[in-house]
């Protein structure tokens, strides 16, 4: 059950409506999480830095790497909304999430790193060293910062009880869990 109402565009301040319009122009839609965040535009702005950080990671780890990393964090944080979001992303890529996607060594490290950060706020020195070797110190910092934003997103969704968007609800209703 949501702890704050899901606003319509007209319920929001002028500043929030401008942000709404920009998101719709960019994505063609606005999710329930983003709509909820627009109650507080500064909170919205803070969590939307997820996108430029993701874009910085794409050349390093690729789109699938971002999905694997994000999904690992979201499932460890037990965030149903984000877990389903990334499963839907896998389905859209033609992958079968029910069969548990096959991970190469790099993706397995990303998944383990994501789970470790989400569970304990740290990973083993060996794993962290492998990632620093693979992506450089700047890449490692980007990964950890991205994990922090992903965890913050999970927290907002879970703590505020944000309703699943219709496509995610359909996955959940079909019995898809994470």
Image (cartoon, helix red, strand yellow):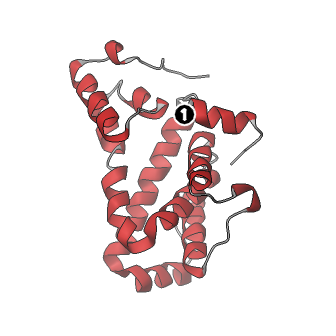
Q: 113 or 19, which lies in front?
A: 19
Splitting the image into 4 quarters, where does residue 137 fall? bottom left
In the drawing, does residue 96 fall left or right of residue 48?
right
Horizontal and vertical percent position of residue 28:
38, 35
Horizontal and vertical percent position of residue 145:
38, 60
Is 143 rendered above or below residue 151?
A: below
What residue is shown at x 35% (from left), y 51% (from top)?
51
**How would you rate the neighbour count of disc 1 (Cα within 10 Å): few for under 14, some for 14-19, many for 20 or more?**
few
Q: 74 or 129, which lies in front?
A: 74
Horizontal and vertical percent position of residue 125:
52, 81
Is 167 rendered above or below residue 9?
A: below
In the drawing, does residue 10 fall left or right of residue 129?
left
Report whether residue 14 is seen: yes
What residue is shown at x 43% (from left), y 55% (from top)?
148
SS type, badge 1: helix
Horizontal and vertical percent position of residue 13:
26, 18
What residue is shown at x 41% (from left), y 32% (from top)?
30
What residue is shown at x 40% (from left), y 17% (from top)?
8
Report whether residue 117 is seen: no
Residue positioned most to the front: 94
Which of the image's four quarters has the N terminus? top right
Which residue is labeled 1 in the image?
A: 159
The total number of labels drawn is 1
């Amino acid at each position: 059950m949501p702890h704050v109402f899901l606003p319509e565009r007209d319920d929001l301040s002028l500043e929030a409506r401008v942000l709404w319009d920009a998101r719709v122009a960019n994505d063609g839609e606005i999710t329930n999480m983003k709509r909820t965040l627009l109650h507080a535009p500064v909170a919205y702005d803070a969590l939307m830095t997820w996108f430029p950080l993701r874009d910085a990671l794409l050349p390093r780890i690729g789109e699938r790497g971002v999905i694997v990393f994000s999904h690992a964090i979201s499932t460890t944080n037990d965030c149903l909304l984000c877990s389903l979001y990334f499963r839907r992303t896998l389905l859209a890529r033609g992958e079968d999430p029910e069969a548990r996607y096959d991970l190469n060594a790099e993706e397995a490290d990303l998944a383990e790193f994501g789970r470790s950060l989400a569970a304990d706020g740290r990973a083993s020195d060996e794993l962290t060293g492998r990632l620093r070797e693979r992506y450089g110190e700047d890449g490692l910092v980007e990964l950890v910062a991205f994990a922090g934003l992903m965890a913050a997103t999970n927290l907002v969704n879970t703590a505020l009880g944000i309703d699943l968007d219709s496509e995610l609800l359909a996955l959940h209703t079909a019995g898809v869990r994470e």
